[in-house]
Image (tube, grey):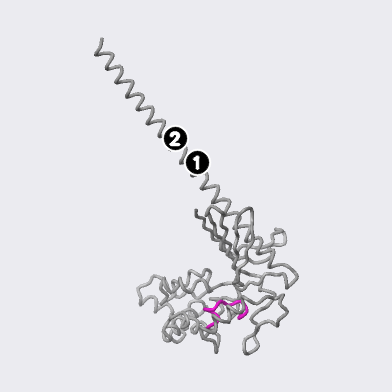
Amino acid sequence: MSRQSGIALLIVMWLLALLAIVLGAFTVLARSERMQARHLFEGTKAHYAAEAGIHRAVMALAVPDPLQRWIPDGRAYQFQFEGAEVEIEIHDESGKIDLNAVDPAFFSRFLQGMGVDMVEADELAAAVADWRDTDDLLTPGGAEDDDYEALGLSYGAKDAPFDLISELQQVRGVSYDLYSRLAPHLTLYSGLSQPNAAFAPAAVLGALPGMDPNQAAFTVDTRRQYDPNSGLPPLTLTDGTPLVVAAGSGTYNVRSRARLNNGAWAELDAVVRLGGAPSSGLAFTALRWQDGTQL
């Protein structure tokens, strides 16, 4: 009888231990699910605060009064939204280099400013021209189908306009590292052979004749500090080209970053064109939309 009592006690103790383990597992699971739900909630809240920043930027870019309208030259704007600090940076796409329209000589100067050797820069600019034109005539220093075949590639020159900026990686001589440095300054939406100096970033502005990198950086800093409400005359280049204009092209790259008090943040990077289809009633059309969220 004593032995049976001992065995029963041992079984009860094992059952209690098992129940404690199960209870602990449920506690950990419940805590994990609570943390996951909070993570999702905070990320979603930050995401929609960043999206509110995109809509706020569109509204500010469409303001009729030029003194109240936001200037899309890369300067930062901040505002509060539902407990989130939102920072917006707007770049007019006309200040970037249009791969389908840029003059090869300008593109070569831009590449040199980005650290590419002059001979290689001329060849890359010519290869871009051969990629986007509709003929198979070789531009001096460029690349047509035979040149791609000689490199063992399964494709030749596209002989059509770029559809995506990422296509630049397929052009002969463009490495991923070079593409990564060039991409932020490229567009497909301006149609200009030379970027608009009033909105061009320093790396692009430096490719203008008579402009060096130091002058370009100083010019951009001065331009972003200019206040249209100051009453001072707008800034210009030495040839009279305006560096600050009130109206943009209508197509903008808007980067909106929202941060919550607990550190959660979200960022949206979009290219928008003001005005949608007449039947849509939309304030803008999204041409590109990328997002990221992190705690």
Residue projecting furthest to the left = 3
The answer to whether the residues at label 1 and label 2 have Cβ atoms under 8 Å apart is no
Residue 34 is marked as 1
Q: Amino acid at mark 2?
A: Thr
Q: Position of residue 98 (x, y in %)?
A: 56, 76
Q: Position of residue 109 (x, y in %)?
A: 49, 84
Magenta region includes residue 199? yes
Q: Amino acid at mark 1?
A: Arg
- In three-dimensional space, the C-alpha distance between marks 1 and 2, rounded to whole angstroms, equals 11 Å
Q: Position of residue 221 (x, y in %)?
A: 58, 78
**Residue 101 in the image: above or below residue 291:** below
**In the rendered image, which residue does mark 2 sit on?**
27
Closest to the observer, 252 or 223 = 223
Magenta region includes residue 16? no
Q: Position of residue 37 (x, y in %)?
A: 52, 43
What is the crowding at mark 2: few (fewer than 14 residues within 10 Å), some, or many (at least 20)? few
Q: Quadrant of residue 116?
A: bottom left
Q: Residue at x 58, y 62 (%)?
A: 256
- The magenta stretch is 196-206
- State left or right for residue 159 relative to residue 69: left
Q: Secondary structure at mark 2?
A: helix
Q: Residue at x 69, y 66 (%)?
A: 60
Closest to the observer, 148 or 165 = 165
Q: Earlier along the polypeptide chain: callout 1 or callout 2?
A: 2
Closest to the observer, 4 or 37 = 4
- State left or right for residue 254 relative to residue 158: right
